[in-house]
Image (spheres, rainbow, N blue to C red):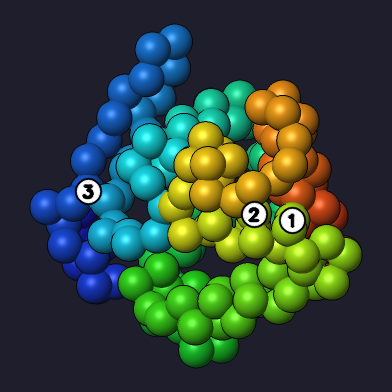
Amino acid sequence: MKESLGKTGYDPKNAETWHFLHAMESIPVIFVPHKIGNKKENMKWFNREVERYLKHSDFTNKKTISLDKFIDNVENNEECGFDPTGTTENEVQVLDELIKDVESIDPQMGEIIRLLYTGYTKREIIKKIDLNKGKTQSYALIKKAQKTAIKIYKEKFI
């Protein structure tokens, strides 16, 4: 794996293989510097994705490809390759448009999504924005904002 990663621009020192409890296979892990979000939330996401992978819940998806195919596609102009070391300009534009769409429904929910994107925790958001609600209702509003953003994203961008 480390040898294959050399041609993608990754530093092979950042590649590891982790073994998870109750897993028959090891999971390749590549650490990429990321300025957005916080470590705790990123690790929660990572663990959810590993769990989903270990359950093989996405293997019926025809878009799933092997690591070798992924690496080959990065350098192949004829394939729709994705280079995770490349610019995220398109992703930022999509996110900005998504947030504007959420704001058009409810400006407060748009601000919640923007703060979540920049790495604020739900607790920090409740302190930062005056939601005029109790604690439970505030968490429910944050969850509603996330569901709204996901719904818009799926309708508009997928």
Q: Element type at marker 3?
A: strand
Q: Which mark is residue 15?
A: 3
Residue at 42% x, 43% y: name it.
42
Q: Amino acid at mark 3?
A: Ala
Residue at 63% x, 76% y: name it.
96
Of residue 131 and residue 88, the one placed in the foreground of this image is: 131
| 152 relative to 142 in the view: left or right | right
| 44 relative to 147 in the view: left or right | left
Q: Position of residue 31 (x, y in %)?
A: 27, 51
CA distance separating discs 3 and 1: 37 Å
Q: Confirm or deny contact between disc 2 and disc 1 (CB under 8 A).
A: yes
- The crowding category of the residue bearing disc 2, from other C-alpha atoms within 10 Å (few below 14, some 14 to 19, many at least 20), is many
Q: Is residue 158 visible?
A: no
Residue at 37% x, 20% y: name it.
20
Q: Position of residue 55 (x, y in %)?
A: 61, 24
Q: Is residue 137 visible?
A: yes
Name the front one of labels 2 and 3. 2
Of residue 134 and residue 112, the one placed in the foreground of this image is: 134
Q: Residue furthest top?
A: 22
Q: Amino acid at mark 1?
A: Met
Tell me the residue that label 1 is attached to: 109
CA distance separating discs 2 and 3: 34 Å
Q: Element type at marker 1?
A: helix
Q: Amino acid at mark 2?
A: Ile
- The crowding category of the residue bearing disc 3, from other C-alpha atoms within 10 Å (few below 14, some 14 to 19, many at least 20), is some
CA distance separating discs 2 and 1: 5 Å
Tell me the residue that label 2 is attached to: 112
| 57 relative to 4 in the view: left or right | right
Q: Position of residue 45 (x, y in %)?
A: 50, 39
Q: How many marks?
A: 3
